[in-house]
């Protein structure tokens, strides 16, 4: 800041009228706004112009993102005042965490910054955040300034007053360029930013950054809302919206220049609406809805070869890779909703089998939800669920040809259904199913159709979102693990090798399983201990447990390590492991003004990199990538 600007601030502060009582407004021609009432009283008693700066707005009711309520709020150059009449003075006026807010705007997660090793001589040490606050010259600097300013509360000691005004330090001092374009030594606090200006007089060597002004000027970017992220080899396909086009098909190699619109399917500002993107061996399949019908499309990533494969069929859904093409469900208006196959050409797109003969559908339904099917690749083909009027819901298998599509299970009784499939080996399938009303785990031989029950589990009764007693079937090294929920008892881990006598509950040392993951030919289990998360553990082949990590992450196998994310308040932290599947390392954080979700349509991964559709304050919802270099924005598609 220039010397003449500082002098003008001195003159302006000396010329300020001293209000005899807070009811008289104090106005400032510099910004055209006034302060009055309790805000004026607080402003005058706790530092005035030097600490808070000029008012930048009127006092008006505003929404608080943290509490979800409306409060009387006024913005200043270096602060945001919020009136809470439910608290006694001086805590009826609360200051916004603008120092932290501006770090979050830059996606700096202060809780994840490295802690200093400990106290430094002659400095203030804050163990809560792991940072020192020191002077930059003899008796002058951030420490002295912090100690000599504080909230006007005689019940607090000097340290407590300063802590109430500025909060804890969130960073170590570092050179940064401020809003005026000056590169200065800077340290961030919860409610302030300290700047060191060594060429100014001693009383102005430490200046407070204009965090209120910068926070007010910070604007969220427009969102392109990436969606339906799918990896095909090393190319990411997804849908997004930019300034010139509606929702269309995009592709990315993980670089800004390599992220581009594949094809403007609906030319101009209209949307082509590609959805249900599905990878195949040689490219991408997707569906496009039109007012008349559904269209099946294929793309190899080029504009010229992004084309219609088949139209004239409806209710296309559940696309999944099979052989040289894809398998899906569709209704041609004659046979109902049935399994189809496509190799990417119109002649190579055909009905596999009319499983439920005539116009009736073969999709699977239950009393509490809909299961279009359950796909399980095995034996060079695909096991899946389908139903007909004669046999009900059964397990079927196909090699992608009409002749090779056949029923392989034979569950009996009027009350039966099939819920989840998991290969045990190339010829045997573990099936979670009910047979004549009894829920059990079954071993089905896909070659002969022979089946036998491995264990039965009591049905869950009453009002519950997921009434299935067994779920999350996960095969590891020729054995299938699964979770069982028993009413009045809780959740337990079971495993089977396909033999009834070897289908048993496993000992988890009193802990409860929550998520199962196969990675690196091991079973990773997320556990809870008396309703407290206990992190991720490895269930070893000898039935012992070893802790992998204590963090509450959602993990996914990349084929070359693990990718993990932790949902935090209004944001997410991303972690990654090396190819040895050992400890996870922190990659970075994305901070938003609202909650973050990571459903399957907003992420895609392979051995090299992981893509995410993430929302932050500066860019809106855009495409991000995590790889060996960390977490970074791929491209701000809609600036």
Image (cartoon, rainbow, N blue to C red):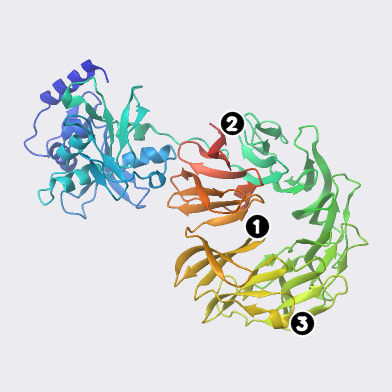
Foreground residue among 364 and 137:
137
Describe the element under mark 2 as helix, strand or loop. loop
Foreground residue among 477 and 97:
477
For image coordinates 22% across by 40% down, the residue present is 121
Q: What is the quadrant of residue 474 in the picture?
A: bottom right
Q: Residues within 10 Å of mark 2 (few under 14, many from 20)?
A: few
Q: Residues within 10 Å of mark 3 (few under 14, many from 20)?
A: few
Tell me the CA gap for discs 1 and 3: 42 Å
**Residue 337 can be seen, yes or no:** no
The residue that disc 1 covers is 520
Q: Residues within 10 Å of mark 1 (few under 14, many from 20)?
A: some
Task: Name the side, left or right, on which 458 lies relative to 181.
Answer: right
For image coordinates 90% across by 57% down, the residue present is 401
Q: What is the number of callouts on the image?
A: 3
Foreground residue among 262 and 28:
262
Which mark lies nearer to you, 2 or 1? 1
Describe the element under mark 1 as helix, strand or loop. loop
Tell me the CA gap for discs 2 and 1: 43 Å
The residue that disc 2 covers is 243
362 w.r.t. 45: above or below: below
Pointer 2 with pointer 3, Cβ within 8 A: no
The residue that disc 3 covers is 414
- Give x and y (percent) for residue 591: 45, 44
- Give x and y (percent) for residue 325: 83, 49
91 w.r.t. 399: above or below: above
Describe the element under mark 3 as helix, strand or loop. loop
For image coordinates 87% across by 70% down, the residue present is 447
- In primary-sequence order, the first of circles 1 and 3 is 3
Tell me the CA gap for discs 2 and 3: 56 Å
């Amino acid at each position: 800041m220039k010397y003449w600007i500082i002098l003008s601030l001195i003159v302006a502060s000396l010329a300020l009228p001293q209000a005899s009582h807070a009811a008289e407004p104090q106005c400032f021609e510099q910004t055209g706004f006034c302060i009055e009432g309790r805000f004026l009283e607080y402003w005058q008693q706790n530092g005035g112009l030097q600490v808070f700066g000029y008012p930048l707005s009127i006092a008006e009711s505003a929404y608080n993102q943290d509490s979800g309520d409306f409060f009387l709020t006024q913005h200043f150059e270096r602060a945001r005042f919020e009136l809470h009449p439910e608290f006694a003075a001086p805590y009826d006026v609360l200051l916004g965490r603008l120092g932290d807010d501006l770090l979050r705007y830059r996606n700096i997660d202060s809780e994840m910054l490295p802690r200093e090793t400990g106290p430094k001589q002659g400095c203030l040490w804050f163990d809560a955040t792991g940072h020192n606050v020191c002077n930059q010259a003899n008796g002058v600097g951030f420490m002295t300034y912090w100690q000599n300013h504080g909230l006007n509360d005689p019940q607090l000691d000097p340290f407590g007053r300063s802590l109430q005004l500025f909060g804890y330090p969130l960073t170590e001092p570092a050179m940064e360029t401020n809003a005026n374009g000056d590169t200065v030594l800077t340290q961030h606090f919860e409610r302030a930013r300290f700047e060191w200006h060594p060429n100014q007089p001693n009383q102005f060597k430490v200046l407070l950054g204009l965090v209120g002004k910068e926070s007010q000027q910070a604007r969220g970017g427009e969102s392109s809302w990436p969606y339906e992220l799918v990896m095909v080899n090393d190319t990411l396909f997804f849908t997004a919206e930019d300034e010139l086009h509606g929702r269309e098909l995009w592709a990315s190699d993980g670089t800004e220049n390599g992220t581009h619109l594949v094809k403007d399917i609906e030319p101009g500002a209209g949307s082509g609406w590609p959805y249900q993107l599905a990878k195949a061996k040689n490219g991408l399949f997707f569906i496009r809805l039109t007012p008349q019908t559904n269209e099946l499309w294929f793309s190899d990533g080029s504009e010229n070869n992004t084309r219609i494969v088949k139209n004239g069929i409806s209710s296309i859904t559940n696309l999944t890779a099979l052989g040289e093409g894809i398998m899906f469900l569709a209704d041609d208006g004659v046979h109902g909703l049935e399994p189809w196959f496509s190799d990417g050409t119109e002649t190579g797109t055909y009905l596999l089998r009319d499983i439920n003969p005539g116009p009736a559908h073969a999709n699977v339904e239950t009393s509490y939800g809909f299961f279009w099917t359950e796909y399980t690749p095995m034996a060079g083909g695909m096991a899946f669920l389908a139903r007909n009027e004669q046999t009900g819901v059964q397990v079927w298998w196909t090699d992608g040809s009409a002749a090779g599509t056949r029923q392989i299970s034979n569950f009996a009784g009027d009350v039966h259904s099939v819920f989840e499939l998991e290969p045990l080996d190339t010829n045997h399938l573990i099936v979670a199913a009910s047979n004549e009303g009894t829920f059990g785990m079954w071993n089905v031989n896909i070659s002969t159709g022979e089946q036998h029950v491995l264990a039965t589990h009591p049905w869950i009764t009453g009002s519950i979102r997921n009434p299935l007693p067994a779920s999350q079937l996960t095969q590891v090294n020729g054995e299938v693990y699964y979770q069982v929920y028993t009413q009045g008892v809780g959740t337990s881990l079971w495993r089977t090798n396909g033999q009834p006598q070897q289908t048993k509950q496993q000992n988890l040392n009193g802990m409860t399983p929550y998520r199962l993951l196969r990675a690196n030919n091991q079973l990773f289990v997320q556990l809870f201990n008396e309703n407290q998360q206990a992190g991720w553990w490895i269930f070893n082949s000898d039935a012992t447990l070893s802790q992998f990590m204590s963090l509450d992450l959602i993990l996914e196998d990349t084929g070359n390590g693990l990718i993990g994310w932790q949902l935090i308040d209004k944001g997410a932290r991303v972690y990654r492991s090396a190819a040895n599947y050992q400890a996870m390392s922190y990659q970075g954080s994305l901070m938003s003004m609202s909650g973050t979700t990571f459903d399957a349509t907003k992420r895609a991964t392979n051995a090299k990199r992981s893509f995410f559709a993430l929302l932050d304050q500066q860019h809106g919802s855009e495409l991000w990538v995590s790889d060996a270099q960390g977490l970074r924005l791929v491209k701000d598609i809609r600036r």
